[in-house]
Every structure is written in structure tokens, then in C-alpha cells.
Image (cartoon, rainbow, N blue to C red):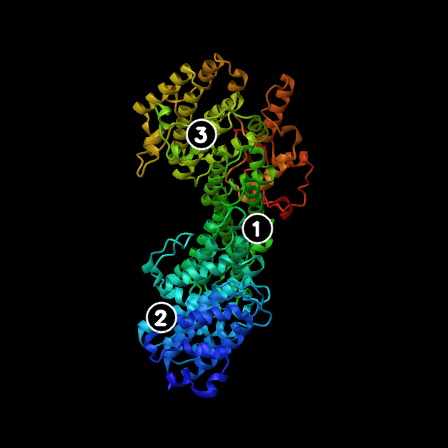
Amino acid sequence: LPAAESRVCGCCGALRPRYKRLVDNIFPEDPEDGLVKANMEKLTFYALSAPEKLDRIGAYLSERLSRDVARHRYGYVCIAMEALDQLLMACHCQSINLFVESFLKMVRKLLEADKPNLQILGTNSFVKFANIEEDTASYHRSYDFFVSRFSEMCHSSYEDPDIRTKIRMAGINGLQGVVRKTVNDDLQSNIWDPQHMDKIVPSLLFNLQSGEGTESRSPSPLQASEKEKESPAELTERCFRELLGRAAYGNIKNAVTPVLMHLDNHSLWEGKTFAVRCFKIIMYSIQSQHSHLVIQQLLGHLDANSKNSATVRAGIVEVLLEAAAIASSGSVGPTVLEVFNTLLRQLRLSVDYELTGSYDASGNIGIKIIKTHEERQLQEAVIRTIGSFANTLPTYQRSEVMLFIMGKIPVPGVHPALTNAGSGGCEGTRMIQIMLLKSLVQVTTGFQTTNMLTALPNSFLEPLLSFSLMEDPEVRLLVLTILLSVIDRHDNTPKFSSISIISDISVLKLKVDKCSRQDNLFMKKHAQQLYRHIYLACKEQSSGPQHFETLYTLLALISMELANEEVVVDLIRLALALQELAQTNEESLSVYNRCAVHALSAAYLNLICQLTTVPTFCQHIHEVIEMRQKEVPFLLPEDVFIENPKLPASLEKLEGDVLFQQSKITEVLGGSGYNTDRLATPYIPQFTGNTHLSTCTRTCAQLLLRSVAPIRRVDSVGMEEQERERRRQVVEKFQKAPFEEIAAHCGFSLSALPRPPPSPSGTISSGYGQTQSRSVPVYEMKFPDLCVY
């Protein structure tokens, strides 16, 4: 009997060691009475007075506990564990290590038992032990068994749901205890080793997933109520946060890799919700300076799944999107361009998969069926993610990314590989152009810079504007959107979302700053490029309402962000040139396009006259607008840019008071100090060739134009009269001379080029009312690849 065992009589009892007698005395006759507190105090005092006996006390308690477990005397088991807990809390001597070995041996014995109550009892004791800071180091203690056993308890499948929940929560608490006990102890086996993390992390995720219905809390887990703490999912989240919060730089990879593997093995990327929740917890819990390590792992995992289904890749990309939004400004890390290179590579692969219908680059039929709509969703997700990453970057790095993406956009004739069957030929090139331009739209959204020269350098602006001459209307619209994002530094764009005649622009509450010296330099260098491309964009047959609205916004932003007196004059000249374009209709524009160009010109002149605040200028503009409202309302934006515009069947040449008069405008602005010579000179773009040419031909003609040194700056102010006249003659020659003559002047030999047969009549019209003998039109010529960029 226990009572007889604890009170041995005779000489044998007297010879028993004192520590055994003290241990025996803490056990009552009836285990329901609990620990004998008075005797426990004696045992504790003895252990503190004779610390060298502590290891023997532990060994004896362990012996008794093993015997009680075997005999199913669970009441005495609980008493023994309570005694061990109190001794652990009270003693911190150098001999504690040997006592701990006995303690861990008893905990192990309980965890190996079949009874859930014993498992929970052992876990609770271990958690108490884990919270104790030991004074001395341990060189040979191992927690491998506890990691394995607690992980196993986290996956408990016990029949009774309440007991199953208690076992799982005990396992979670146990893992938390192991982490606390070992994470800062250099003498312990490294808890961050893959052999441990591959057990701990999946166990936590398994329980976190069981509570997927509850949304992850904000960064701090300390606000949970007591009721929430009873939930295995909430307990798991707190444990997971603590684990990640303790991870040093070198341990992040080992902690995140099991998360990636768990999401792979259980097909959890496709649902996105749980994967996003996991990585929200990770990003909020780790130290902010380590964020880029997580993102790099996600990018590497995305590359590793390049041939997986679009839904899996989209799930990884969505997680990247959320991670980038949470991370700090340094989240991309030292390899900024590599992040964007990976995302752009995935974009390119998705386009290839969509066009070829196969994950196999050789063109063989893939085992998996590729769904176009899923690939499109992936592409949009990648583009959003590129924008999310860009938003974390400082201005100078964002400029680098803009240049990097621009360099990836294929240009026909320069990237011949894009014309092969594997990439879908021309359609593949077009899709990649659109995707990369959409990426640029995301990167430039919210872009703020004080120096336009650095924001739009030649290496970025020239290729961007070259895309504004492409036949594809979607490409042209994206280019204009990018220009708006970069130029708009005061968020004025939303105020010009639609074209209209605004009688008083003060209601728009526009933000206008004085043009800086850097802005003046930028316009001096690039103004003519911008004007030319705006002019040519209005000549495109495929331009729709969105194009004209965006062009109007672009003109308005240039007027407010980059305008000095010279720029204002040039913009007025440009608006009048657009009116002349629609009036003469040399480009054979449709009635709608002609009316749209007239409306664009009117809306912009209405805006610029109010910005200049010259009363007589405003009066002339308003008089013309009023006359149009009465006689030709289809030349105003309110009647053109609507769902069903009422347009005439044909548009005859207009005259009189419904047109803005250049002479009148020159007169009224000259009286306010504006340059009358410049105002009186009609605007002529540097390149006015046939706008219906193919992209390659247009680009070649631009190259030829750039090679003509005397006409690089046609409309420069302050030149002597003789120089101005000479330049005018050069421009006129360029407009009217045969193409062969221009090419010969530039040093190009066209003798080797194949020619079509001459016109049946032997002559063709130059487009300016003159005839030229046997001159072949530019758009009928065949150019070698070297002439195209």
C-alpha cells in the first residue's frame, strides 16, 4: 500500500536516505487529498540546502512516477509532477542539469502514455519548465523527441472532438515551449534545422488551416480575448508569430521553406485565401529588414512552378502582391531588377503558354490543358504585383525599373525571335508589348519627381514615344497613360477625365506651380518630340474617344506642369494646327475623327485661354465656341464624345466665325507681350510623312529624319532671319522632295532595294498638289531589317 511504503517501520526505515523519506512524505494516503504542502516545503528547503542531492531527488521521483504509471495510479502521478514543477521553480543551482534530465525523462514517460490526460499533464509540465531561465548551460540535452511527439499531438485524430482539441492544443503549447527553450541557447541542437522545421511548421499550419474562417489579425497578436485563446487556430497563430519573430537573418529560409512545401503538397495555392493568410502572418511577424528574404523565396518558388497550372502560379503571385504591400520600403532587397526580371519572365511565359497552348517550348501538346482565361487572370495578377513592388521603391529606383521594363518591350525588326511560331508571331509580339506597357502603367502610377529630366531621360522617352506611332490603338492609349502618370505631379489628371467646355476653370481647383529651371530644360530638349507625337496621334484613323480624352488631358497637364511663355505659344500653335488638320483633311480622316479633332482643339484653347488670363484672348475663344454652339455643335466635345453622337454625313470645309483665327490670336496675345513672330508661324511637325505607314516604315523614316542634321531643331527661337529661312527651306524640301532624294542626302543607298513597278500614269501625287516623275511612295517600298529599329 502507498501508506505503508511511505512509512517503513523498524531499523530498515531508519536507514533509508533522508531525501527518500522527504519525498515519500509528500504523498498522502489518499491521492485525492493532493500534495502534502507542509512536507513539500520541507523537501524544497532540503533541496535548496543540499543542492548536491537534487539529482537524487529527481531520480527517485522519476522512479516512483514510472511505477505509478505502470500501476495506473494516476493520482500519485499528478502529485509527483506537481512536486517536480515546484522544485524546478525553486531551484536554480548548478546541479539543476541532472535534475532536469530526470524531469524530462518523466515528461517523456507521460507523453508516451496512451491516456490523453497524461499526455496533457506532461505537456503542461514541460511548458512550465520551458518558461524557466536556467543559470547554467546544458551541453548534451536533446529535445528531438519532444519536437516529434508534440508535432504528432498537433495532428491528433482522437475520436472525441473535445479531447482531440485539447490534445492538439497541448501539442501546440509544447512546440511553443520547445522553441522558447532552445531558440536562444547556442549549446542546444539548432531548432531552425530543416529536420525540426519540417515538423514544427506543417504542424502549426495544419491547425491554422482548421480555423481558416477567422481572418488573420493585425500585426500584434496581443489583443486576443480569453475566448479566442481557447481556439486551436488562434493559439497556433500566436505560436507561429512567436516562432517567426525569433527568426534571425540566417533562419528565415528554413522557416519559410516548409510553408511553401505545405501549400504545394495540399494544393492550397489555388484557393489563395489560406496562402495569403499564412504569408500575412509571416510578413507581419518577421523583422522588417528580413522581408526581402521572404520575397526572394517566393520569387524562386514562382520560377520553380513555371510549368505548373495558371491557378497555382496566380496564387503565388497573389501572395507576392500581398507581401509587397506589407513589406517596408527595403523589401525588394539589394537585387531590385532581379525581382522585376522574374515577374516579367513569368509574364512572357504566360503569353507563350496562351498562344501555343502548351507548356512545352518545343510545341508538343502539353499534358495539362491550358485555359486562356486562367492565363489572362495570371497576367493581370503579375501586372498588379509589379505595381505593388514599384510602390515600395524610392523614386530613383523606380526610374531604373521603368528603364528596365522599357528595354524588355519588343520592337519589330529588332527582336526577330518574336516572329517565330513558338511565340505566336506578330500576335505574340503585340500581346507582350501590351502586357509590358500595362506593367509600366502600374510602375508609373503615383510616380512623383521634381526633375523631369531624370524622370523622362532620352533612353526612356524616345522608345516610349516611338510606340505612340504604332497602328494598334491599345498600345497608343497605354503610352499616353504612361506619359500622364509621369508628368502629373499634382494629381490633376482626374479633373480632366472627360473633355468639355468649362466656362470657369476655377471650379476645378487646379494645382499649378511655377515652371522650374529643370522643367524648362526638359521642354527645351523634348518639347518638339511631344508636340509631334500629339499631332500624329490625332491623325490616326483608329483613335477613339478615349484617345482624344487622354490627349486633352496630356495637353492640359503640359500646360500646368511644364509651361513657360514659349511653351504656351507652341501649344496654342499646336491646337491651331490640329484645327487645320481637321479642316483640310489631307489624311482622309473619317467624319467622326475630324469632328473629334475640332472638339479637342476647341476644348484645349478654352482651357489655355483661361490659364493665360488674357481677357481679349478669352473673348475670341468664347465667341467662336458660342458660334459653334449655334451653328455647328458637332464641332464641340459635348456633342462628339457621347455614346451616340449626331454627326453630319460629310464635313465640308468650314469658314468664318466657327474657326479660331491664328491672326486674331496673334494680335491679342502680342499685345500682352507674347512672341508674335512665333505665334504667326503655323506649327509644322518635324516629321509629317504619311501616317498610314506600317510601324517599320515609320520607324525607318524617323531614323532618316534624325540623320538630317540641319533640321534637328526646326522651330528654335532667337535664330537670325537668314538661318530661319534656310531651315524653312530644308523643311519644305523634306516635305515635298522625292524619298530617293532625301535618302541620298542622308547618305543612304537605295539602289539595292527592290522596287515595285512604276505607276501606270508614270507620275504620282506628292500630297501637296505637285507631281513627281516616277517617284515610288514611301509606303510601297520594301526596307531591309537594318533600316528598322
Residue 248 in the image, given as x and y percentages of width and height: 56, 57
| Residue shown at 60% from the left, 70% from the top | 139
Spot occupied by residue 114 in the image (x, y as percentages of width and height): 39, 81
Disc 2 designates what residue?
166
- Residue 556: quadrant of the picture: top left
Disc 1 to disc 3, C-alpha distance = 38 Å
The residues bearing labels 2 and 1 have C-alpha atoms spaced at a distance of: 42 Å
First in sequence: mark 1 or mark 3? 1
Residue carrying label 1: 333
Image quadrant containing the N terminus: bottom left
Identify the residue position indicated by label 3 in the image.
Answer: 556
Q: Which amino acid does label 1 sit on?
A: Gly
* Type of the residue with mark 2: Lys
Residue 640 figure quarter: top left
Rounded to the nearest angstrom, the CA distance separating label 3 from label 2 is 67 Å
Characterize the local packing of mark 1: few (<14), some (14-19) or many (20 or more) Cα atoms within 10 angstroms: some
Q: Is mark 1 on a helix, strand or loop?
A: loop
Q: Viewed as shown, does residue 749 lie left or right of 497?
A: right
Label 2 Cα crowd, 10 Å radius (few <14 / some 14-19 / many 20+): many
Mark 3 Cα-neighbour bin, 10 Å: few <14, some 14–19, many ≥20: many
Amino acid of disc 3: Ala
